[in-house]
Amino acid sequence: MNALDEFRDQILVAKSVLIVGHKHPDTDSIGSCLALAHAIEEGREVKVWIPKEKLPEMEFLPFSDF
């Protein structure tokens, strides 16, 4: 089993997930965190934490209340 299969298996059984971005994230990092949260949200509690001030231009995105 590879790392991606292991990740998928863990997400499938999780009831809650915390997605953490890296320090000094760029918009690619923020977008990736928000996209992952949106992709796995069904049936689980998902939170996104990114160590940066909220960007007003991204407030329209799902899960952008990090």
Image (cartoon, grey):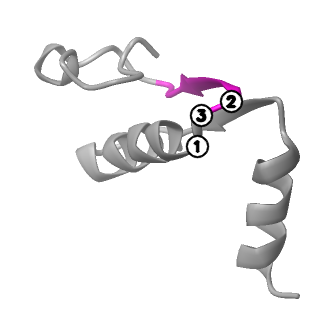
Q: Residues within 10 Å of mark 3 (few under 14, many from 20)?
A: few
* The furthest residue to the front: 43
Q: Find out whether the residues at labels 2 and 3 contact each other: C-beta distance under 8 Å.
A: yes
Q: Position of residue 20 (x, y in %)?
A: 61, 36
Q: List the residue tagged with mark 2.
A: 43
**Residue, x 56% and y 24% (percent of image)?**
49
Q: Which mark is residue 40?
A: 1
Residue type at mark 2: give it: Gly
Per the model, the C-alpha gap separating discs 1 and 3 is 6 Å
Q: Is 23 colored magenta in this rendering?
A: no
Image quarter in which the N terminus is found = bottom right
Percent x, y of residue 11: 76, 50
Coordinates of residue 7 in the picture (x, y in percent): 77, 64
Q: Give the SS element for disc 3.
A: loop
> What amino acid type should be assigned to the residue bearing mark 3?
Glu
Residue span colored magenta: 42-51
Q: Looking at the image, is 41 positioned above or below residue 6?
A: above
Q: Which residue is mark 3?
A: 42
Residue at x 29% of width, y 52% of height: 28
Depth order, front residue of 45/30: 45
- Residue type indicated by callout 1: Ile
